[in-house]
Image: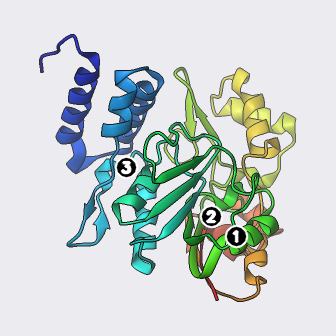
Amino acid sequence: MSFNTNIGEDVKRLIKYLRKKWHSDLTTKFDHLFQKLDILTIKASGELEEVAINYLNTPSFNKKSKELKIYNFTRPYYLCEMNAILKRYSFEDKVVCEIGSDPFLECSRAAMLLGAKEVHSYDYGLRLDDSYDDKIKVHKYHFGQGDIPEKKFDLIFAIATLEHIPDIESFARNIFSALKPGGNAFIQGEPLWLSAKGHHLWIDRSDVKYHFDDVSNPLDDWYHLSRPSKDQFEKDMINKGINTNEISFFWESIYERNHINRKTPDELIHYFQYLDNVEIEIFRNMNYRKQNTHFEIARKSYPEEDLRTSGLTIFLTKK
């Protein structure tokens, strides 16, 4: 490849080349590369920002198979859940709400591609704004922090969100209020606190990376449920080769910070089940990972079914 002085075009051509070369065998490694390139491009100004918004990660839809294509998503689990929504509901001509939107509005853009009339995207971490698309309304705060529009949405969806909501009761009521009669909601979360990787440890810096969902995860399955003392936790992490400078952050992230709600599956389900005038279906995503000592300790306090419940999906229809 040759490069010219137009850096925006160079970045565009480079990423196009990488996607073409690897899209048929996209691995987590390349997903991460594309995500970093996106962030780098978004942080730049002027032409680079325009390239990022208009070119990168544009979802594509196979009308014949009625499925979104995988290689255009920076996080493949978004694709999986979007296709789960498509099996139940249509986006065509719908006013749609996405709660916990991904930073680059990939799922909201997919909803527009699938025929949505208008999409409202809620998340404090959004990198794009209303100038991207006048049919995508960006709300840079958590759903429920501002005024809740009553009976506005035909479809509400939330992917990898349920485990982060601190007040499930208010969240369930707000979804009910925001849905039109006959409207549908798809609410999903994973991994839940009681599951093998429910600690949700995530450090992603240039010098160090620990992700709960890949081989960089330093914690044994269900370790977080054994509730070690701080001293024991420090010893265990040192034995794992963790730098002592990171251990206090590990502890705070797993046990103290409010980025996850640490609720059981039954606690998450409860307030949805007791909404009036709704039809509801709930599915547990079960994971039968090999039992270990931490699992046996946790089983003294929690049902095995809950320890095996990696995620929950709630389908809801307002009557």
Q: Nearer the viewer, residue 47 or 29?
A: 47
What number is the disc on residue 291? 2
Residue that carries the numbered disc 3 in the rendered image: 73
Q: CA distance from mark 2 to mark 1?
A: 46 Å
Give, as a three-letter code, the residue at label 2: Gln
Query: In x, y percent, where is residue 208?
Result: 56, 25
Residue that carries the numbered disc 1 in the rendered image: 150
Q: Which mark sits nearer the N-terminus, 3 or 2?
A: 3
Q: CA distance from mark 3 to mark 1?
A: 31 Å
Query: In x, y percent, where is residue 293?
Result: 70, 58
Query: Which residue occupies 58% across, 70% down?
Result: 153
Q: Nearer the viewer, mark 2 or mark 1?
A: 1
Query: Which residue occupies 27% across, 16% down?
Result: 7
Give, as a three-letter code, the residue at label 1: Glu
Q: CA distance from mark 3 to mark 2?
A: 33 Å
Q: Nearer the viewer, residue 109 or 134?
A: 134
Extreme front residue here?
134
Image mark count: 3
